[in-house]
Structure formats: C-alpha cells, structure tokens
Image (spheres, rainbow, N blue to C red):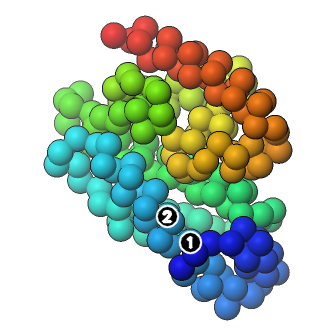
Amino acid sequence: MSEKPRDLTDLLIDWRRGSQEAGNELIQAVYDRLHRMASYYLRQEHAGHTLEATALVHELYVKMFSSKPVKWQDRAHFFAVAAQQLRRILVDHARAEHANKRGGDRFKVSLTAAKNLPLPADILDIDEALRSLEALDPRAAAGVELRFFAGLKETEIAEALGISLATFHRDWKIARAWLLSQLSSGD
C-alpha cells in the first residue's frame, strides 16, 4: 500500500480522536514500511542474530499502540516516535543478549547503514554515544536517530525536525564527525 503523507496524517489525527477504524487503517498503511525498516536494519546484523524483522515490528507495534495515546502531529512525527521505539527495543535486546553471554560477543551493527559512517560499532556503544550527543545537541541526535533507526530521507528528517535541509546537512556533518570520534575512542 503506498503511503501518502496527508492520508497518514489524517489517519493519525482520527485515531488520536478515538477512531478505532482509523487505527486499523493506520496499521495497514504503515506495516510494510515498518517491516522494510526492520528488515533493512537487521540485515546489518551479524549472522545468527536472534531477532527477526516481523518480531521486531510486532514488538514495535505493541509499544506504540498499547501505550497511552500520543498526540500525533503528522506522518513525520509518527516515524520519529517509531525510530525512538525501534532504538529502545534493539538496545534492550542487546543488553539482554549481552547479559546472557556475561560479557561475550554483543551484537554488532554497522553504521554504514546510516550512509558514510563506515565504523562498525556495537548497538550499546551507539546508544551511549547518541545519549551523549543528545545532551550536547538534541536536534542533531534526533536527526541521526531518524536517519539510522527510522531510515527516513533527508527531506523527511528536515520536515520532522522543522528545519531546513541545509540545517540538517550541517547538523549531520557535525553529528557524524562527533559520533565517529566517540565510537573510535573506545577502540
């Protein structure tokens, strides 16, 4: 099913107002996109990873649709929240897997998924670096999260953050350099 930003925004607004039908239509409209995001992300993982894209989307669904209603603003806001929740699920999974192995191999992600971030890193390290970046520059950290975890296009990220594309590019350049320095300092 193709997504039309206005259609999704209308569904989100109607769902927020209590329309269960709009909520069901919303799920159908975004499921394929969320599944593609999860599949893309999980392809970056090591062989034998225990999460599958369908399970990841279903866990994301439970987190997003069973909590108290969110005051959705638009399509970009929805995918921003989805990116945050996806990140939390993956970090929680990594922590649990790491705890089970008592310091053994933690699952790896490749920042190349975020374009031009060639340094392989551990999801827990990425999360820690993003938390540090959030303290310094919340907008830049949000841009990284939307690009890496939600797979949004640059124009969609700029729209979601309410900034120009040029501002996003400046934020991205600074965030990329900062994250690379943080992640390489642990080697």
Q: Are marks 2 and 1 in contact (CB under 8 Å)?
A: yes
Write the residue at 23% across / 53% down: 50
30 sits left or right of 140 in the view: left
Seen from the viewer's position, the closer of residues 155 and 58 is: 155
Compared across the picture, whether 34 is left or right of 156 comes to left
- Where is 53 relative to 150, above or below? below
Q: Residues within 10 Å of mark 1 (few under 14, many from 20)?
A: some
Q: In the figure, 95 relative to 1: above or below?
A: above
Q: Which residue is mark 1?
A: 30
Mark on residue 72? none
Q: Identify residue for label 2.
A: 34
Image quadrant holding the C terminus, namely top left
Amino acid type at mark 2: Leu
The quadrant of the image that shows the N terminus is bottom right
Query: In the image, residue 4 lies at what x, y percent?
Result: 68, 72
Looking at the image, residue 4 lies above or below residue 145? below
Residue 87 coordinates in the image, percent (x, y): 50, 46
* Three-letter amino acid code of the residue under disc 1: Val
Describe the element under mark 1 as helix, strand or loop.
Answer: helix
Query: Image quadrant of residue 74?
Result: bottom right
Q: Nearer the viewer, residue 173 or 138?
A: 173
